[in-house]
Image: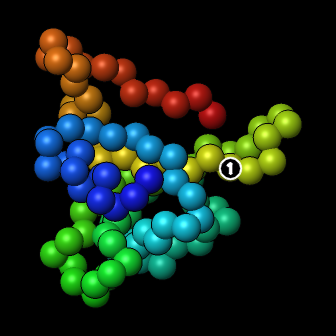
Amino acid sequence: MGYALASAILEAKMSFLMRMSSKHNLYTMEKAELAIWSEGAVFYWPEEGSEEKSHRFPADLIRIPAQGKAKHDVWLLTNILDQRDCRCDGGQVLPLEMAK
């Protein structure tokens, strides 16, 4: 997932849940240990001009640990920071639960 796509989705006032790769840099307010990370707030902004904080946006990074035959954890990024923001076109609240 690229920053440009995420920005376009945000400008359209839509939500996303996208798989991330190690190519993307995310930033935290405090030092975080990747080895024990499970879920939490991060900031995402483009590599070019990464010093300019006006282009950053808050997101939630979720780690799904590898299980069974899977070799690698799955990392998901979403701009849904509050379950109350999970709404479909009909205005119904959608449950957001993750099996661990």
In this rendered view, identify the residue nearer to me: 2 or 36.
2
Question: Residue 9: which quarter of the image?
Answer: top left
Residue lying farthest right?
69
Residue at (68, 49) in percent of width and height:
73
Q: Position of residue 78 (x, y in %)?
A: 37, 46
Image: 52 above or below 41: below
Asked if residue 19 can be seen in this view, the reply is yes
- How is the structure coloured here? rainbow
The C terminus - image quarter: top right
Asked if residue 62 can be seen in this view, the reply is no
Residue at (26, 39) in percent of width and height:
15
In this rendered view, identify the residue nearer to me: 27 or 10.
10
| Label 1 packing within 10 angstroms: few (<14), some (14-19), many (20+) | few
Amino acid type, callout 1: Asp
Question: Residue 64: which quarter of the image?
Answer: top right
Helix, strand or loop for disc 1: loop
Image: 89 above or below 22: above
Q: Left or right: where does residue 88 sit relative to residue 28?
A: left
Residue at (40, 72) in percent of width and height:
28
Q: Position of residue 60 (x, y in %)?
A: 38, 52
In this rendered view, identify the residue nearer to me: 84 or 91.
91
Residue at (81, 48) in percent of width and height:
71
Q: Position of residue 68 (x, y in %)?
A: 83, 34
Image: 38 above or below 68: below
Residue ID for mark 1: 73
Instruction: Please count the marks in the image.
Output: 1
